[in-house]
Image (cartoon, rainbow, N blue to C red):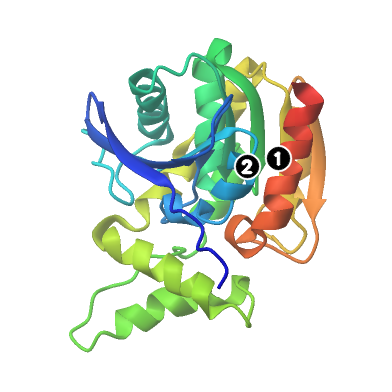
Amino acid sequence: MPRAEAPPRRAYAAAPHGLIHYAERGEGAPVLLLHQTPRSWDEYRDVLPLIGARYRAIAMDTPGFGASDPPAGPWSVEAFAAGVLALCDALELDRVALAGHHTGGVVAVEVAARAPERVSALVLSGVPYVDAARRAEVAARPPIDEVTPRPDGSHLAGLWNNRRPYYPDDRPDLLDRLVRDALNVLDRVEEGHRAVNAYEMERRIGLVRAPALVLCGELDGFSRPDMAALAGRLADARTELLPGTGVPAADHRPDLFAAAVLRFLDEVA
């Protein structure tokens, strides 16, 4: 029988706001992976061993998600970024490569803007360019994940159906995993999205100095249109499309995602 792959190392780190949960694989230069709303480190479950074969790959639960304690105040990109830097401090990581997907990518921008000396490289996967025009556009849209709990449990199907159009029909397991994470933060499931749409990226992105890869699934209709705008506002950026995947690129095609990250890190190391 084939030998089962060892699970990642999992632990908690103390931060000013509480505990931060993370999982990691591998040794060497650290690569910190930041998930989308309303996910957890599990979004990178199959990415960890691939990047961990050559780096110390760390997937954290953003404060308020997964098994991490929530921020002390209102949820915001700035509060999430403070949690990222708190984890780096706790793990004594002076410099890290950051890879963030959707919400995680917006958080990575803020970390790289706030502490440019601590970010060696930046992978922004499926990240929108959040300026005033986009904030106004998104404010007029219906919520992404928000549902109202109902006695008959129909809100559970609502969580599933809200995301179903953006996930491959032959991979219900991906939606299973998303719904499990969403249930963990059901009363605040939309707050990560609201935090992203309140973020004034146009004021912060010019502070980023790390070389960046702007990455996106070719089927991601939310973020693909913003790739050029995002890359054009970074001091040192290149772009890449991942074929045959979209919003769930990191867990749908961990092989393509990890390969793109590794190629980029090889290029800028």
265 versus 22 height, above or below: above
Is 109 on the left or on the right of 225, as rendered? left
Q: Position of residue 245 (x, y in %)?
A: 71, 64
- What amino acid is labelled 1 in the image? Val
71 and 74: which is toward the camera: 71
Q: Which residue is mark 1?
A: 261
Is 8 on the left or on the right of 244, as rendered? left
Please indicate, yes or no, whether residue 229 appears anywhere in the rendered image. Answer: no
Is 27 on the left or on the right of 85, as rendered? right
53 and 176: which is toward the camera: 53
| Quadrant of the image occupied by residue 231 | top right
230 versus 88 height, above or below: below
Residue at the spot 60% in from the left edge and 36% down from the top edge? 131
- What amino acid is labelled 2 in the image? Ile
Q: Position of residue 139 (x, y in %)?
A: 49, 53
The quadrant of the picture occupied by the N terminus is bottom right
Q: Which residue is mark 2?
A: 51
Q: Tally the marks.
A: 2
Q: What is the C-alpha distance between the residues marked 2 and 1?
A: 8 Å
Compare marks 2 and 1 and give the one earlier in the sequence: 2
